[in-house]
């Protein structure tokens, strides 16, 4: 190879010879970046003071290694793919998603096996998304909330993305439950969307978790309990009320968008 | 581990270090620390600062070797080590700047003994002449910004001068090089 600097030059560079001018030293340094044999050659040219310093540092490093933590293992995803750091939000929300799906499954099973006249799936469908949506936007449940709260773009956009992710998971489950119990999609979809939008709109004022809890309580006390006691389908879930549900979805979505600033950060009551 | 540790290249040593292999780390230290010391010593000649910087660097390497393994391929292990070390040096200078001034390596004079054999392979003669003709204080800035890959702010800390001075010297160096090469 013609590219290597002469051994004499490397030795003089190693010794800090002031006669090696800057430009020469730069080309040596650039060469050493990519050439292990020349680095080995350089190691031989370090003077006594340098050697002593390196030995001193080696002892200190050894002490630091013994006292400190082991190397951080590189994180790997399945199939050997490497992932940059994940925030863990998905893992935190998953139990709540499973709970919601479980609630739906119980309602579906009860309606099919026990009492076909009670529209249980229809009754719980507005409540199903509330739990995971609230969990997806809560400070206590979010391992990355410090990052979220300090990210300029984190507001409504992130909340809507998480809500969308929750709905995408729950929609197939609702569709399956509706199919098994003979409920048309439009009947459960509109209340479900209206309650989701409602929890976001109200959440801007009091926090998404509180809003979801309040809506769930109102729906349970005002609709589910009377329906179960009287054994009659509630009026709000009759086909004639669907236009009202659609209007509610539109109005609540507009409110969410107009009040986007309410979601600028995860406040303490979220 | 059928291969002797002496025959392993530095990328593999880093990979083993990431798995907690202490022997691989020691071998890496043996091979790379003289090079790092010499290179750092051209930027700062206070032995205490150098010892601190080297210690910080190798502890960071021990704990973060996985970061190199997980990083995109392409960068050599040596440039990865250097970028850690030079940033630790900037940090050390920043700490020291609050208490006392550290004697920096004085820019040497413009005397330039011929070392054509090393230069011909890497720098064209024009570039070499142009760089050699730069005043020392401009060359120092060029070295910090281009060779060491530091930002203007970091260079200002390392060289102990205001950011505005770094910028204006970089601009003067650019103009001088452009004229010399045109």
Image (spheres, coloured by chain):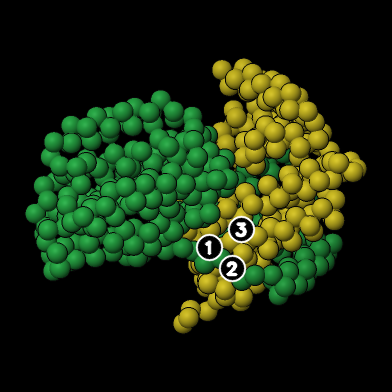
> Left or right of A263: which side holds A122?
left
Residue A266 position, x and y percent, is 53, 42
Q: Is residue A31 above or below residue B7?
A: above
Residue A242 position, x and y percent, is 17, 36
The residue nearer to you, when weighing A40 against B113, is: A40
The mark that comes first in sequence, 3 or 2, is 3
Residue A197 position, x and y percent, is 34, 38
Q: CA distance from mark 3 to mark 1?
A: 26 Å
Q: Are marks 1 and 2 on the same chain?
A: no
> Left or right of A31: which side holds A126?
left
* Residue found 17% across the figure and 52% down from its top: A232
* Residue found 14% across the figure and 46% down from its top: A185
The colour one sees for chain A in the rendered image is green
- Which element type, helix, strand or loop, lies under badge 1? helix
Q: Are marks 3 and 2 on the same chain?
A: yes
* Residue found 90% across the figure and 43% down from its top: B99
The residue pinned by badge 1 equals B66
Which chain is indicated by disc 2? A
Q: Is residue A263 above or below residue B177?
A: below
Residues marked 3 and 1 touching at CB (< 8 Å) = no
Q: Is residue B144 above or below residue A106?
A: above
* Residue found 59% across the figure and 28% down from its top: B126
- Which element type, helix, strand or loop, lies under badge 3? helix
How many labels were placed on the picture? 3
């Amino acid at each position: 190879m013609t590219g290597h600097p002469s051994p004499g030059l490397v030795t003089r560079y190693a010794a800090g010879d002031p006669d090696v001018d800057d430009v020469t030293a730069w080309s040596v340094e650039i060469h050493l970046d990519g050439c292990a044999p020349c680095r080995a050659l350089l190691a031989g040219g370090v003077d006594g003071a340098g050697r002593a310093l390196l030995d001193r540092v080696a002892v200190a490093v050894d002490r630091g290694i013994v006292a400190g933590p082991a190397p951080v293992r590189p994180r790997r995803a399945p199939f050997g793919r490497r992932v940059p750091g994940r925030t863990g939000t998905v893992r935190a929300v998953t139990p709540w998603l499973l709970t919601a799906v479980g609630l739906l499954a119980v309602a579906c099973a009860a309606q099919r096996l026990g009492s076909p006249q009670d529209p249980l799936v229809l009754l719980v469908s507005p409540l199903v998304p509330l739990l995971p949506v609230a969990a997806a936007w809560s400070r206590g449940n979010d391992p990355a909330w410090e990052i979220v709260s300090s990210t300029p773009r984190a507001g409504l956009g992130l909340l809507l993305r998480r809500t969308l992710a929750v709905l995408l998971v729950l929609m197939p489950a609702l569709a399956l439950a509706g199919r098994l119990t003979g409920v048309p999609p439009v009947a459960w979809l509109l209340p479900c969307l209206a309650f989701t939008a409602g929890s976001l709109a109200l959440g801007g004022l009091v926090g998404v978790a509180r809003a979801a809890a309040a809506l769930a309580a109102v729906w349970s006390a005002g609709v589910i309990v009377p329906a179960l006691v009287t054994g009659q389908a509630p009026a709000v879930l009759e086909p004639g009320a669907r236009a009202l549900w659609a209007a509610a979805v539109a109005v609540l979505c507009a409110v969410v968008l107009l009040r986007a600033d309410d979601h600028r950060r995860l406040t303490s009551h979220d | 581990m059928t291969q002797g540790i002496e025959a392993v290249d530095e990328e593999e040593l880093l990979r083993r270090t990431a798995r907690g292999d202490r022997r691989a780390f020691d071998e890496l230290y043996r091979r790379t620390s003289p090079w790092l010391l010499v290179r750092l010593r051209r930027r700062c000649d206070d032995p205490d600062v150098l010892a601190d910087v080297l210690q910080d660097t190798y502890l960071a390497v021990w704990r973060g070797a996985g970061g190199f393994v997980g990083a995109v391929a392409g960068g050599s292990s040596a440039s990865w080590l250097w970028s850690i070390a030079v940033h630790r040096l900037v940090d050390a200078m920043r700490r020291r700047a609050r208490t006392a001034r550290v004697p920096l390596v004085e820019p040497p004079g413009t005397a330039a003994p011929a070392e054509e054999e090393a230069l011909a392979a890497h720098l064209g003669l024009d570039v070499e002449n142009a760089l050699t003709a730069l005043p020392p204080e401009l060359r120092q800035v060029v070295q910090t910004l281009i060779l060491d890959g530091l930002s203007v702010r970091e260079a200002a800390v390392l060289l102990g001068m205001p950011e505005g001075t770094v910028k204006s010297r970089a601009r003067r160096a650019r103009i001088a090089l452009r004229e010399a090469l045109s």
